[in-house]
Amino acid sequence: MSKELEKHRNTVGNCKVISIKAAKTAFKTPCTPLETTLERNNLPETPVTLYYVPSEKVIIIAYENNDQKWHMDLNIIEKPATFGNYRYFFLCSKCKKMVQKLYLPVTSNIWTCRECHRLVY
């Protein structure tokens, strides 16, 4: 890829990121809004509200992007793991791939996986 094209692509470091590990904190208080922050590399923390709906296996995330308020349903997939435990994944809303992290670039209002946003490291 040319250097000129590379300059115009979004990078992972310039995006808001939510990991399944951070989202699992909302599992402890189902059907109750949880105020938290998302960290970004070299950028200030972003306040968000997570609301876990166990019957639908969805986390509703309320956030602000480009001075507008947004909310989105993030689908959760539960896979059996060893010793009766479970591993959790997000389901990308665009490609339906199971992922550990979802990204939100400044140029978008939809949380999707790194590949769907065409992000580079």
Image: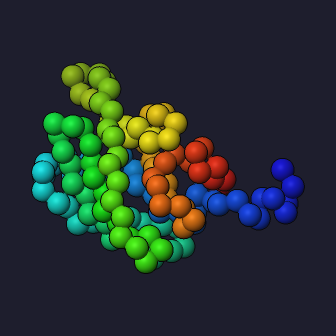
Q: Is residue 87 left or right of residue 26?
A: right
Please say whether residue 103 is visible from this viewpoint.
Answer: yes
Please say whether residue 45 is visible from this viewpoint.
Answer: no
The image position of residue 78, as x and y in percent, is 29, 30
* Residue shown at the point (77%, 65%) measured from the top left: 7
Above or below for 100 versus 105? above
The number of discs equals: 0
Q: Is residue 22 left or right of residue 10?
A: left
The image position of residue 49, as x and y in percent, is 26, 63
The image position of residue 10, as x and y in percent, is 65, 60
Which residue is nearer to you in this view: 29 or 117? 117
Q: Is residue 95 left or right of residue 46?
A: right
Which residue is nearer to you in this view: 58 or 23? 58
Coloration of the structure image: rainbow
Which residue is nearer to you in this view: 40 or 71? 71
Above or below for 84 versus 112? above
* Residue shown at the point (84%, 50%) measured from the top left: 1
Above or below for 85 versus 25? above
* Residue shown at the point (64%, 49%) measured from the top left: 118
* Residue shown at the point (87%, 55%) measured from the top left: 2
Quarter occupied by the C terminus: bottom right
Q: Is residue 22 left or right of residue 43?
A: left
Above or below for 14 versus 77? below
